[in-house]
Amino acid sequence: MPELPEVETTCRGIAPHLQNQIITAVQIRQPQLRWPVTATLAENLMGQQINAVTRRAKYLLITTNNGTLIIHLGMSGSLRIVDLNWPVGKHDHLDIIIDNGKILRYNDPRRFGSVLWTAEPIATHPLLKDLGPEPLSNDFSADNLYRLSKNRKVPVKSFIMNSHIVVGVGNIYANEALFMAGLLPSRQAGKIALVRYEVLVNCIREILEKAIKQGGTTLRDFVNETGKPGYFQQQLKVYGRHGQPCLNCGQPLDEIRLANRSTVFCRLCQR
């Protein structure tokens, strides 16, 4: 599933092509995604100028004067900028045609993403209103993380993957950040000292920033706006390396399931 770095990579890639452009047409080939594509989408978007392309958590937001288009890439979705005559593929479900001769094309083999429209203030939308802070913003702090962890018995990995606590720390990056911070993923969130949360916050930021710089991680489906994969998987130190030597100490890495997610760690380096 595309996580925050992949969505941020997509956002940064498509924004220069869309900013201040006029939408001239919308073509919906397959409306049945995770939720049905908003029935009035074409009517709402036609003739509108794109004022901004931003990201909130794993949602891409395309803002016009009429309202906001909310796109989630689901398990296998991607957005690409293509020319008007670019051939349509089997899983190309939706096109937004703009007046610079380009198309924003949504592709989703598993159809678990979503394309929704709202005319209401975006911060009040049910999908976004209860989300935690962005991990690369000043609102994400060790003090806040420590305060929210009080008396929490959940594993710290599940804690930082909770989007009400902080958004965008998906499974891959939670594994990597906890390894960098030297924290055992199964350790109870409420039993971690403030000083260790300070380290963890810095590690989460560093891992996400590195992943964004590398264009995200491609393990199966993800491609950016030009169709290229992300390259951060070449820098993964624990995720997907169960049984291989720890790059710090040489001890074979262990794997457990936490909240039904693969969790790889080093028993010597993480405590």
Image: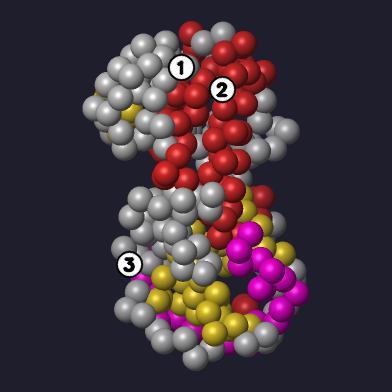
Label 1 to label 3, Cα distance in Å?
36 Å
- Seen at 69% across and 57% down, the residue is 121
Is residue 162 at all visible to an observer of this figure?
yes
Q: Nearer the viewer, residue 143 or 10?
A: 10
Give the residue number, with chain letter if any, for mark 1: 183
Q: Nearer the viewer, residue 118 or 159?
A: 159
Residue kind at label 1, given as amino acid type: Leu
Look at the numbered disc 3 and give the secondary structure of its residue: loop
Residue 119: image location, x then y, percent: 65, 66
Give the residue number, with chain letter if any, for mark 3: 109
Crowdedness near tag 1: few (<14), some (14–19) or many (≥20) residues, C-alpha within 10 Å: many
Give the residue number, with chain letter if any, for mark 2: 200
Residue kind at label 2, given as amino acid type: Leu
Between label 3 and label 2, give the one nearer the viewer: 2
Nearer-N-terminus badge (3/2): 3
Asked if the residues shown at circle 2 and circle 1 are in contact, with their CB atoms under 8 angstroms apart, the answer is: yes
Q: Which residues are magenta?
A: 12-34
Look at the numbered disc 1 and give the secondary structure of its residue: loop
- Seen at 62% across and 11% down, the residue is 195
Tell whether position 185 is magenta: no
Residue 85: image location, x then y, percent: 49, 91
Asked if the residues shown at circle 1 and circle 3 are in contact, with their CB atoms under 8 angstroms apart, the answer is: no
Residue 204: image location, x then y, percent: 56, 31
Residue kind at label 3, given as amino acid type: Pro
